[in-house]
Every structure is written in structure tokens, then in C-alpha cells.
Image: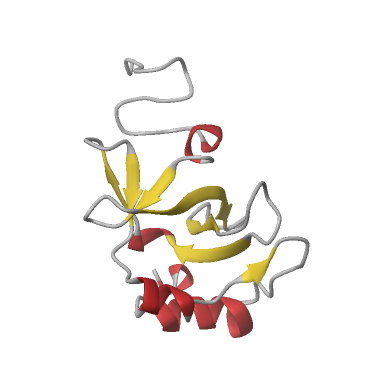
Amino acid sequence: MATTTSSTRETHELIGSDKVEGTAVRRPNGDKIGEIERIMIDKRSGKVAYAVMSFGGFLGVGEDYYPVPWDKLTYNTAIDAYELDISEDRLSGAPRYPAGTEYDWSREGGGKRVYDFYGTQPYWNF
């Protein structure tokens, strides 16, 4: 039986989605980029496809959402945050959508744009 580190929502190797949501995303130097708004899971394979990072705005107004391939994030226990190695200039060109709008999650559309931008294999190719 697995021991838990914080109730049944987290074990040594697993974490509940509700504990991921709201977690900070930082650059390797510690600068905060944003936070995890939600994670997107493929219904059929069960693979985590994206973390949707919120960034910008004030009190939710003017905030944008950035889909990031899950494998581009690294959890750093020392700072209790996910790390994403991306510069401010590069982030400004990342696929995103404003709060209150819908994103094209199709593999051929928005999904392809996200994985092409980050230069990684799409989750559906694994």
C-alpha cells in the first residue's frame, strides 16, 4: 500500500489534478511565469496532453491561457513549482487564448501549433 504525503490526493509518485491546479510555473532562475489553471487529459489514452498556464491580467481580467505540452514542465520540489525554460520574448509568441474564449484543441489545429511551437513530439504519437 502506498503511503501518502498529503491525504489521498497525493502519493510519492502521483498527485491529484486539484493539487496541480494553482501551482506556480517558474523559469529555472525562479522568476514566476504564471500558474497551472488546469490540465487536459486525453479521454481515450488517459495521457496528460497539456497543462494550461494562466498568465497576465489582474484578478482574472485580461488574463491569457497558454497550453503547454505536459512533458515541457518539470516539477521542482525545492521551490514547490513547475519549471518551464522559456524566455519572455519566446513566451510572447506562444500559442494562447484569452479568458472567456475557446481554444481549438484539435490535433490538426491548435494541438499541432502547440507541439510545433515547443518542438516536442505530440502526446498522440507516443
State which quarter of the image contains the N terminus. top left
Residue 3 picture quarter: top left
Q: Is residue 29 above or below residue 67?
A: above
Residue 104 place in picture, x, y as percent: 69, 75
Residue 54 picture quarter: bottom right
Q: Is residue 120 above or below residue 60?
A: below
Kindly identify the residue that appears in the image at 54 percent across and 76 percent down. 95
State which quarter of the image contains the C terminus. bottom left
Q: Nearer the viewer, residue 91 or 116?
A: 91
Kindly identify the residue that appears in the image at 48 percent across and 70 percent down. 124
Q: Is residue 30 above or below residue 101?
A: above
Q: Nearer the viewer, residue 111 or 64?
A: 64
Residue 70 place in picture, x, y as percent: 42, 58
Residue 79 place in picture, x, y as percent: 27, 38
Residue 112 place in picture, x, y as percent: 52, 82
Q: Is residue 104 above or below residue 74?
A: below
Q: How many numbered badges does the structure rendering display? A: 0
Compared across the picture, whether 22 is left or right of 83 comes to: right
Name the residue at the front extreme.
58
Compared across the picture, whether 116 is left or right of 80 comes to: right
Kindly identify the residue that appears in the image at 52 percent across and 83 percent down. 113
| Scheme by which the image is coloured | secondary structure
Q: Nearer the viewer, residue 108 or 67?
A: 67
Kindly identify the residue that appears in the image at 64 percent across and 59 percent down. 63
Compared across the picture, whether 21 is left or right of 32 comes to: right
